[in-house]
Image: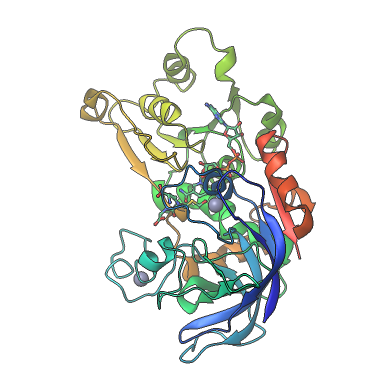
Amino acid sequence: MRTRAAVALEAGKPLEVMEVNLDGPRAGEVLVEIKATGICHTDEFTLSGADPEGLFPAILGHEGAGVVLEVGPGVTSLQPGDHVIPLYTAECRECEYCLNPKTNLCQKVRATQGQGLMPDGSSRFSMLDGTPILHYMGCSTFANHTVVPEVSLAKVRKDAPFDKICYIGCGVTTGIGAVIYTAKVEIGSRAIVFGLGGIGLNVIQGLRLAGADQIVGVDINPGKVEMAKRFGMTDFVNPKEVSGDLVGHLVELTGGGADYTFDATGNVDVMRTALEACHKGWGESIIIGVAPAGAEISTRPFQLVTGRSWRGTAFGGARGRTDVPQIVDWYMDGKIEIDPMITHTLTLDNINEGFDLMHRGESIRSVVVY
Ligand code: NAD
Ligand code: AHE
Ligand code: ZN
Ligand code: ZN
């Protein structure tokens, strides 16, 4: 079939919206009509050329929701008409990783996914002249139709709106999950969140859900303050307005350091600050942000010797096929909010505007509705 897609032809260039060929689903694969997709900072990271795994030409996008149109041979858990959210972290429920309760990093399709290919080593997308186009993060939601492995699809309830629940495909689950599944934050905790964007705000709402007493937000863009307060931020710090040592300021503000800190910036200097702003003896710092190729983190080992821990999380530690339908229920039951964070709704033809809004720091989430 043919479908419309925003294609990343090369790094650093705007996406080009065009008709592309899409082959049908093979064994273990599913054809999905994407109804809506969010634009995450990770899409911009890959498009910019900073991603060591970035390959071109590719169809980016990993924060979508849609409807199953056709299933390939051997697919048993889904049928046409099902509503789904594509998962960049699969859940096969049988690999060594899925069987280990300590991780959500299913490896069933990860190797080919990182090469922009389906599990059989080929791509379903091509240009009209036959040139192959690569998949992205196993999702490629910047296409009106996409083919996804069965193990990379969460089946969700049919009454949930696509233009909101697409955000659960990455930002909502990553932020809330980092608190609930990865850090397992206790009631009464003090926490600091670095970066109040599409991920950091969901960390904040996760902290409120977990019953944190103090939620400090740190961002260099004061335009993010109002939204962060709405989601539960109790204190705001703009590093540009702190004279002197930022770590010292944060340690004092949290009465000796935070129980938990979260980096949602992808900046390795911020990651160090986040680790060092943790409480001596027990503070845990969770890295969510994705850093550019070649970037490295550092601190004095003494920071760890004296009881701080450095950890990371992908997709908030969520097991997608199990946890994502539950997060959709939380949204539908009013336990979490999504709507105010979707600040802009675009068409596929205007998708590059979503990247411009992100660059200018004017959006939280832009969502493309097909
Ligand atoms: P975003 O652009 O919406 O937000 C980033 C925020 O960080 C902005 O508000 C910006 O002003 C702030 N910021 C930038 N530099 C800062 C600094 N030096 N100090 C304080 N604040 C600073 O991006 P997003 O969509 O929220 O994504 C955030 C990060 O999380 C990105 O690196 C993204 O790639 C990553 N991410 C990781 C996962 C995962 O599974 N680990 C999932 C999604 C996104
Ligand atoms: N490809 C990059 C790393 C990108 C990365 O860390 N991706 C996160 C999800 S970001 C979603 O917005 C992730 O899930 N990582 C675990 C994994 O298996 O990819 C690089 O540096 O090579
Ligand atoms: Zn993302
Ligand atoms: Zn698995």
Task: Kindly identify the residue that appears in the image at 68 percent across and 52 percent down.
Answer: 337
- Nearer to the camera, 12 or 215: 12
Left or right side of 282 for 271: right
Which image quarter is the C terminus in?
bottom right
Q: How is the image coloured?
A: rainbow
- Residue located at (49% from left, 71% from top): 152
Locate residue 261 relative to residue 86 in the image: left or right: left
Residue 355 picture quarter: top right
Query: On screen, 5 above or below 364?
Result: below
The quadrant in which the N terminus is found is bottom right
For residue 227, above or below residue 338? above
Residue 256, position as x, y percentages in the image: 39, 20
- Residue found at the very far front of the displayed protein: 129
Asked which quadrant contains residue 259, the reply is top left
User: Eyeballing the image, is 251 above or below 316?
Assistant: above
11 shown above or below 362: below
